[in-house]
Image (cartoon, helix red, strand yellow):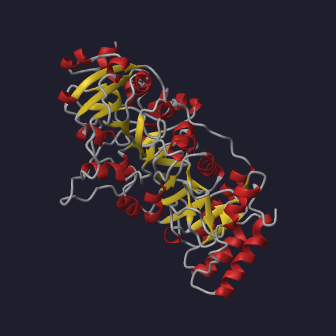
Amino acid sequence: MAYERIKVQSLHNKVITAEEAAKLFQNGMVVGSSGFTKAGDSKVVLPALAERAKVDPLKITLITGASLGHGTDGKLAEAGALSKRMPFQVDRILRNKINAGDVLFIDQHLSETAELLHNKNLPQVDIAVLEVAAIESDGSIVPTTSVGNSATFAALAKQVILEVNTAIPMTIKGIHDIYQAEDYPRRNVIPIVAPENKIGRKTIPLDASKVVGIVFTNELDSPADIAEPDTKTTAIAKHILQFFENEVELGHLSESLMPLQAGIGKVANAVLTGFIHSKFRNLTMFSEVLQDSTFDLIDAGKLDFASASSITVSEECYSRVFDHLDRYRDKIVLRPQNISNTPGLIKRLGIIAINTAIEFDIYGNVNSTHTSGTNIMNGIGGSGDFARNAYLSIFVTQAASKGDAISHIVPMVSHVDHTEHDVDILVTDYGLADLRGLAPRERAKVIIENCVHPDYKEQLSDYYNRACERGGHTPHLLEEAFSWHINLREKGTMKKDQ
């Protein structure tokens, strides 16, 4: 039954075990793997490589679409098998190894990795490990729950190992739109003018002669960690929806808004879930990940179409989607991430981008990747692709956390991922600051008034007022700009004199 998924007869003799596949890797190799936000990733080959590395040490550079599931990044890191990792991760063990300097991490915009490979600005991929639902008679492969960078890995890798996942229904074929732009300098316009436009093919082209191993698996993706909306995320969602309602009243937007993009996590899910009971209708999405809230909106009749690069959902939602895929087939599409995240399309389609910040400062600069300016959390992901090119760039965070010992609005961010020039709207559970058309001094007043936790409002106002006395277009007290972070490190709180 499993062999029926390999329609190229000559490839049947390429079927091997995961342990045999792991022996194909050599020290110093560059490895590409499918997988985007824990969806469509290697389920057995990379874990087998981690086991091999425990007894036969080797190190690889690992490039994926985004994060891997099933703790695979952590297994590889713990086994000492990673020398370098890019472009995104969410694993606690790997994160600790990166922050300790044991693994080098390249934090990239998700639109860039494939481009750098095609332009030969990164070393060639030696082996690609790609999860597929099937191999077609022409040698092309049917992706599973993500596309990510798989099309680029298939085209450019010297060798390919395929994981044929029989847990994925064959009905998945047809929800993918595989399109690769031409190489420079003769690149053409990508002909997408609406999220529902399909411009490519249903499968990923692959030269079957590059296949050095096929491993059968029968394992689902790691389920997404979905948290129910809490008081803070509900408040943030309410502020954003009220803002959209006002934009409609002003005639800036219609009730279908513009195509939506939302980062992963509980805040994004809360914001999108909030649309269910709103007056907005005929919504569309041009994003990176289809989450539970995406399918909730489709089921509620609010969302007409959603384009992304992966499906990352909870266990309950996974069954709902893949047991009834025909219900969603004409409402979703999965694309390569250098299409889903390409800046030109984001600008052309007029995307409303909603992403999460770790902290932002009084002038609108956003830190979305590092704590206290030093330790990486996950990575910039696609937020930068969308922020700089969006019709509206919105960043959200809670005003304070850890028993209010940490303010997420500070005098100066400890690490800059998104400058004030790329940020339109900032939202916390206390309010929303619309920064459009405001000079730095105006932005500071609006942010302090609307977004800051009450425990920090006077403290932040005092900093700003004293900075203004010193002068400058963007007033700062350099000797105090990071004093909040220093106080947190030394005393466990950002509150002054504590």
Asked if residue 323 is positioned above or below residue 336 in the image, the reply reads: above
Indicate left or right for 152 with 218 as reference.
Answer: left
- Tell me what residue is drawn at x 65 percent, y 86 percent: 470
Placement of 135 over or under 441, stated as above or below: above
Residue most extreme to the right: 498
Q: Position of residue 302 (x, y in %)?
A: 55, 48
Image position, residue 27 (x, y; %): 32, 32
Left or right: 201 as drawn, with respect to 468: left
Q: Give the residue at x 40% y 28%.
A: 46
Instruction: Where is residue 427? Give x, y as percent.
Output: 64, 62
Q: Which image quarter holds the N terminus?
A: top left
State left or right for residue 289 relative to residue 451. Answer: left
- Front one among 273 and 448: 448
The C terminus lies in quadrant: bottom right
The total of numbered circles placed on residues is: 0
In terms of depth relative to the viewer, which is nearer, 332 or 127?
127
User: Height in image: 24 above or below 34?
Assistant: above
Residue sitting at 31 percent across and 16 percent down? Answer: 16
Q: Provide residue 338's location: percent of width, then percent of height.
A: 35, 50
Residue 17 visible, this orientation: yes
In terms of image quadrants, where is residue 408?
Answer: bottom right
Residue in the picture at 31% in, 26% down: 162
Q: Nearer the viewer, residue 463 or 27?
A: 27
Q: Is residue 197 visible?
A: no
